[in-house]
Amino acid sequence: MSLETSSSLGRDAWLRLRANRMSMISLFILIGIAFVSIFGPALSSYDYDQQNLDRVFESPGKDHIFGTDNLGRDLFARTTYGGRISLAVGLLATVVSLVIGVSYGMFSGYIGGRIDTWMMRAVDVLYALPFTIFVILLMVLFGRNFLLLFIAIGAVEWLTMARITRAQTMNLKKSEFIEAARALGYSHGRILFRHLLPNLIGPIIVYATLTVPAVMLLEAVLSFLGLGIQAPMSSWGSLIKEGAEKMDAAPWLLLFPGIFFCLSLFALNFLGDGLRDALDPKSSKD
Amino acid sequence: MVFEMPSIQNRPRTKIMGNLDIQNLKVSFHTREGIIHAVDGVDLSIKPGEIVGLVGESGSGKSVTCNSVLKLLPVPPARIEKGQIEWSGKDLIDHDEQNMQAIRGKEISMIFQDPMSCLNPYLSVLEQVAEPLVIHGMASLEDARKQASEMLVNVGVQRVVDHPHAYPHEFSGGMRQRAMIAMALVTKPSLLLADEPTTALDVTVQAKVLSILKTLCTDLGVSVLFVSHDLGLVAELADRVVVMYRGKVVEQNHTGSIFSNPQHPYVKALIACRPTLESNPVRLPTVDDFMNPKTGKEEALEKLVAPSLNLDSQETLLQVENLVVEFPTEDGPVRAVDGASLMIRKGSTHGLVGESGSGKTTLGRSILHLAQLMSGSILYQGKPINLDHPDDRSKFRKSMQIIFQDPYASLNPRLTIEQTLLEPMKVHGIGSSRKERIERVINLLEEVGLGEEYLHRYPHEFSGGQRQRICVARALTTEPEFIVCDECVSAMDVSVQAQVLNLLRSLQASRNLTYLFISHDLGVVKFMSDEISVMQNGKIVENGLADDLYRSPKSDYTRKLLNSIPLANRSANFQINRPSV
């Protein structure tokens, strides 16, 4: 994250991350889930939208290893296909919100004064907009679009990120090492990216790992309202929602997407913790 | 240091004349990095009515010893391994939390260092001072308030008489610390534990608070354990001094004997390495000198009186005229610097002394254009400073540097020492290749007394003194002519302070540097400076040669500052003529 400078910080961080067993396990789990999501639909002999009304609600077995749903669609194909969308929405929207939020908050906090006040009032106004109405508006204006989902979710999630970053920046701005950097004649850009940003990484990563699950759930809510992913396409969120409705009759419909969802969230959280520690030179090297 | 004290009405009361006896106390901290033996076999006793000073540098275990008496240690990680803390016949180590609560504040009270955070901001001061009496069932609420009010008047907080509902934020730091003293003494305890109670205060306020503390405790017959890092300060107050070093008591004796005849090399070092107002050696002795045999060369330097610079022959490097700096606040602008003028000669050290809030730090920063000036002019080598053109700006930034007070906050924790020191050279295009720059960095590290092996470490791996050396090295990367030292040794133990001061002096000699040396400590400023300016409320009240200013101060304020310095810190040959108890 700290651009040109990070050769040694990056290497140290990787060494420290490698020593953290939970983080490494999490990293492998995430890679595994991503792998299954990318190649799973191709490996399965069924398509995610292929219906077979003769074999509805079939429990997990030889033909359908995760079972089938109420329209006889193969759950394995649907879960892995849904993983693509959920992971993509979760990670991309988080990255979008990080980029917007961190740069906005850092800029606002660093400049301070009247500009900061106005920038933060703008954030307050956006906060006040009801999320669903905002998304419906976008849909009406631009039509239903997969990309819009990222934008809509990213556009809401960056607000909190901006506030957190701003508060941290204002604290750090007063530190003597920032003042020393000014006294040494460093440019504002250099101070922002080389001296401020690396010191913001801790809270940013923690918040980012919390944002990913929030985004995935938001996507499920949108899909439920008919604004997100539409059947026959699937996502973990929408699969869990369907599964929860038919929990008594066919628990596997909830179980398998749920396992995937929970595993990724757990792995993300542990990886986030590990990254935060690894990127902090103060954490011990053992 | 004579203040009129209202006499205490002696109420009839029954009091346990406590006798504190600590025997072979061992306290350790169990952390992830391992076990730290903070207190390692300490014996200490306080007789009724005695004032005992406990002196040591940070990390010596003095506060831990003090806190373990009332069992205020954080458990875990702290653990009392061994020993006895006998208080009027009972061993406090066996006491459970409930029994301790009956003793805390009633028989033994405590005062802490930071007056700003010791009072609850949501309760009025009177209420808080009265609270211990009510809690220990010593008085009814009404009676407690009356007693609290009396005690507050005794410590000089008159304000509560007319404003019984005044809250802590309405008081200054000194007044809050007085209120803390009132709160600790309102129950008339037999023992008062005071942990660095005046360290956060200005010298003049410190002198007042100390004299109040001493008079009250003597009147009430309270024995005191006074913990401090400042041996000179303790000498003002204590009958007996106990010196701690690395968790052990290295020496204890009557205050007079400690100064006239110190036994342990560490105690000798503590007395010797304070810069005093009277002496002016080229080099200050350091603790290492006493622990290890020193070379003849260094010893000679310590005896040598620093040659005074012939100031008239030096050209003017920096001229500040009528500088005004304002900060906007909600209640309108506040003038931090109000028409200050000073002149700094090349190769000299100009000291700037003042209490907190006097504007000295703002003045230093505005010279470097780190604070916005309102009016006035700053001429550097006869020319105004122009920051508009990038070339001029780079030249200006290269030639002027600053070293800050807190070495912990002034290094970027995410950069290695190598990165921190290379960056200014990269930005200003010093050195043609990376190899050449690294060579320069290594030379600089050696110049400040650190080695090549530290290059790839991060700031948190260093001690405070080492970090300040790194800050000095960073300031030197651009080969400046002028350095502002903003309270750069204030947060340090005397032994480390002596090392950094010696370093700054020898660098000045070898590189012909000019310093603006800002500090609240007159002794340190006197040691470093050729000329001194005294600042009060944003104005410079006195300007002059260091020796003249000390011998014949012209302004009342300077005189007051000088008189507030503990006697032992004024002269190297300090003797106490106090009958030993």
Image (cartoon, coloured by chain):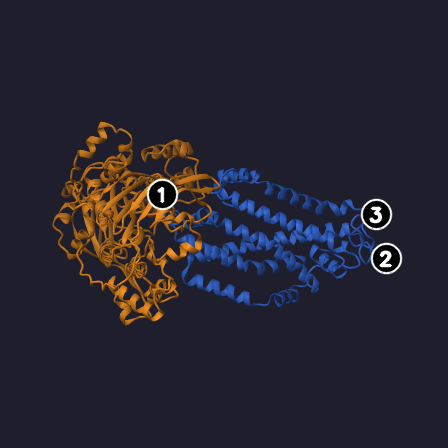
Q: Which chain is blue?
A: A
Q: Which chain is orange?
A: B
Q: Position of residue A47 (x, y in %)?
A: 79, 51
* Residue reaching furthest to the left: B552
Q: Amino acid at mark 3?
A: Asp
Q: Amino acid at mark 2?
A: Leu
Is residue B99 toward the left or the right of residue A210 in the image? Answer: left
Residue A63, numbered label: 3
Using a 10 Å C-alpha cutoff, classify the residue at mark 2 as few (fewer than 14 neighbours), some (14 to 19) or many (20 or more): few
Residue shown at 73% from the left, 49% from the top: A80
Element class at badge 3: loop
Is residue A122 toward the left or the right of residue B562 in the image? Answer: right
Residue A53, numbered label: 2
Relative vertical location of residue A148 with respect to residue B19 in this rendering, above or below: below
- Residue under mark 3: which chain is it in? A
In this view, the residue in front, A35 or B454, is B454
Q: Quadrant of the N terminus of chain B?
A: bottom left
In this view, the residue in front, B16 or B261, is B16
Contact flag, marks 1 and 3 (Cβ < 8 Å): no
